[in-house]
Amino acid sequence: MKQATNDAAPKRALAAKQERSRQLRDRVIDRGRVLVEQGGFAGTSMAEIARAAGCSVGALYYRFPDKDALFDCVIEQATSSALETIRAKAAAGRYRLSTTAKAVHAVIEDFADFIQDNQGMIRVVYQRALEESRYWAVVRTTGFAMGSIWTAAILDSSDRPGDPQFRRQVRIALAHVTGVLTYAALVSEAAGSHLSREEQIHWLALVATQIIEAPPFQNTPPAQPEKPKAKRKPDRPD
């Protein structure tokens, strides 16, 4: 019995140490996210981040070899958290509504919230992607994951869940409207940026619903113009 007690003490100490380490890591990432969102990450030193997180510079570098490693963890945590929230909403029936139009409206509301909550981070990621192509993978992966969740949710709210053409048009619609909202976050003078959030969501939901419910695109070749008939030369008189 005494031996079991002695064995348990180091395990508890290790668990407590791991928990403190996790809490410190979370504090650093939280501080990094605030800086990214405020546009101050690039101009803040690791020493300043360590001071704000309440740890030594050595402890910070032990967990994050450099600022790029910290930035990557900040982006990963932010995108993972956003996807978990969307999945939870979908599982709770947030998008399981009576019509496709209502489901689309709810989806666009939530994407608009994501853009609003992460506007600074989105700008920084796109800027970095222009300098380092690996960040495009973050953009593509996150966009695809969100689109997959919302596509499945809209299909569930419709009477055509197994229709591949319907699925395709849902994806096309979401690609268009999420692209507009992302562009508006990147360019403050973008078309539609002067609209209120509610009006912007209204028009984008209307456009998306029309794309989804439109007749399928028919890729038929354009009609060829008829060749003019050759004029017959009049017969010469004998």
Image (cartoon, grey):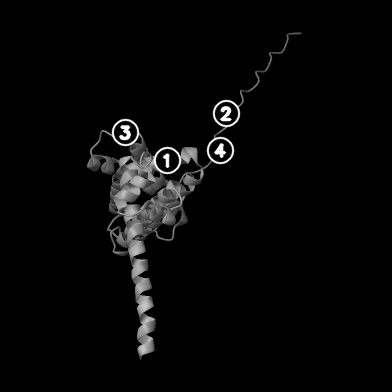
Q: Secondary structure at mark 2?
A: loop
The residue at 44%/40% (across/down) is 128
Q: Which residue occupies the extreme top position in the image?
A: 238
Q: What secondary structure is marked by label 3?
A: loop
Check disc 2 and give the amino acid type. Answer: Pro
The residue type indicated by label 3 comes to Ser
Circle 1: residue type:
Tyr
Picture coordinates of residue 168, whole percent (x, y): 45, 51
Where's residue 73, x and y in %? 41, 53
Name which residue type carries label 4. Answer: Pro
Tell me where residue 54 sits by quadrant.
Answer: bottom left
Of all residues, the one furthest to the bottom in this rendering is 1
User: Mark 3 or mark 4, which has the lower sequence index?
Assistant: 3
Q: Which residue is mark 4?
A: 221
Q: Mark 3 highlights which residue? A: 188
Foreground: 190 or 117? 117
Residue 209 visible here: no
Q: Give the residue at mark 2.
A: 225
Q: Is residue 58 visible?
A: yes
Q: Which residue is mark 1?
A: 126
SS state under label 4: loop
Q: Are marks 2 and 3 in contact (CB under 8 Å)?
A: no
Labels 4 and 1: the sequence-earlier one: 1
Quadrant (top left/top right/bottom left/bottom right) for the N terminus: bottom left
Mark 4 vs mark 1, CA separation in Å: 38 Å
Asked which secondary structure carries label 1, the reply is: helix
Residue at (48, 48) in percent of width and height: 137
